[in-house]
Structure formats: structure tokens, C-alpha cells
Amino acid sequence: MKKQIQRSSLLIVLTLFCSLAFSQAFKGEIIGGFNKSQVDGDFAYGFKKYGLTGGVGVVVPVYKNWSLSLETLYSQKGSKLKPQYNDSLDGSYKLMLNYAEVPFMIQYTDRDIVSAGAGVSWNRLVSVEEDRDGYKVDSVSVLTRVFNRDDWMAFGDVRVRLYKNLILNARYSYSLKKIATRNMPDYENGKRIERDFYNNLWSFRLIYMINEKRPDKSASHKVPVTD
């Protein structure tokens, strides 16, 4: 029932957003970049897992400097720990979580240069792979449902215009609910402990704007002609 409510809410948001997009001038986005991620709870500390992120988006102006945006992305997340010992069981760890992601955001833009926003994203797990001590863990897959298929994340977003339609973007995201509960080994003392997992990541992206009508600054400097 809870999943049905979440999906129904997302459908309502998408429907309202599409209505706005067709009723007003909208701007398209082509997005590409990378994630630096970790999974809180797995003892592999630090944003050491790199992954690709990219897709498309649409931005709809709603009031003065305020706008709404909706994106469709492919996003690679997870965590990574380098070998800890010179042994066949070297203590290395790698978790690869690949998602289809739909972020929804409200943002404020200042002087057509800098913008800041916040939002939520719905993530659907596409594939998962876990390697421990250099060996694949066969019991972990999408079908075994060790990790939840759905992940709702909150995020903050900052954008700076680099040149014309090209924008540099930094985004921080964190899971609103746990994505898994697992019995994990603590490499410091060798004991096992039950831990809740949460996605935690930074995204750094380049965004190319399409159909963007920027203000004509030269018009404000023209001297009016009088008779």
C-alpha cells in the first residue's frame, strides 16, 4: 500500500509538471557528470566510489526568479574500500548500486548567473553488485532484494553559469529512508553488527540548456532616441 501511495504521488507530480510545461515556456537540459558516493552503514568510510550520472531535464519558470525542474537520470552509486591486508582475504569492499533517478526541484536564480535549489528524487534500483575481499557476493542482486528497489532522497543543488548555455552544477543527496539493513563485519575488531544503509553522495555535473531565452542585457544600455 505504501509503495502504491508513493507511485501515485509521483504520477500526480509528473502530471502537474507536464501541464505547467505545456502551458508556459520551458527550457530543456542535457546533463552529464559523475558521482562521488558512499553508503553510510557499511564501514567503507569516505566518498571513494566514483560513478557516472547523466540524462535529460526540463525547467519551467513559475514566478519571477523561481522555477521548477524535473530530470530523468541514470546514476551510479555505492561505496568502495581498498585492500586492508596483504592476504587472500584482503579486506577490500566494493558496492555498485545503479539507479534510474527522477529528481524534482524548486530553485531560485539570481542575476541569471547563480541558482540554488532543493528537492526530492525517486530512485529505482536497476542493478546491484557487491564484491568482498576481491570476490563477487552471489547472494546480492536485484532479485534477492537485499537492497530496497525504491530509494527516496533529499538534495540541495547549486549552479553557476560558466559560458552562455553551459552551467556547472554541484548537488548533495542523502537517502530519506534506509535502503537496506545488513549484518556487517567490522574490520577493526572482527565482530559483526547489524547496520542500516543509506545512500550518501555528491554529484558534479555539466548542464547544457536548450530553448533558453536569456535577457538581452545590451537593451538596457541603449540610449533612447528622442525627436
Image (cartoon, rainbow, N blue to C red):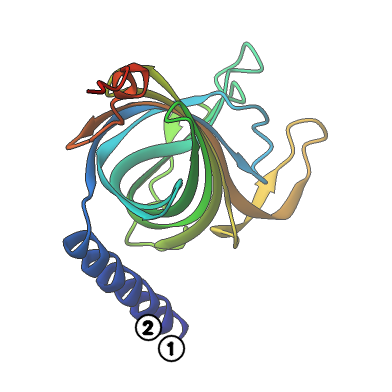
From the viewer's perspective, tell me whether residue 17 is left or right of residue 190: left
Q: Residue furthest right?
A: 189
For the C terminus, the image quarter is top left
Disc 1 on helix, strand or loop?
loop
What numbered label is drawn on residue 26? none
| Above-or-below relation of 140 to 9 | above
* Residue 68 placement: quadrant: bottom left
Q: Quadrant of the N terminus?
A: bottom left
Residue 160 % position (x, y): 46, 24
Return the residue at label 2: 4
The spot of residue 173 in percent (x, y) is: 55, 44
Q: Which residue is mark 1?
A: 1
Pointer 1 local density, CA inside 10 Å: few below 14, some 14–19, many at least 20: few
Q: Tell me the amino acid under the disc marked 1.
A: Met
Q: Nearer the viewer, residue 35 or 198?
A: 35
**Most foreground residue, 14 or 114:** 114
- Verify CB contact (< 8 Å) between mark 1 and mark 2: yes
Q: Is residue 220 left or right of residue 109?
A: left
Compared across the picture, whether 194 is left or right of 38 comes to: right
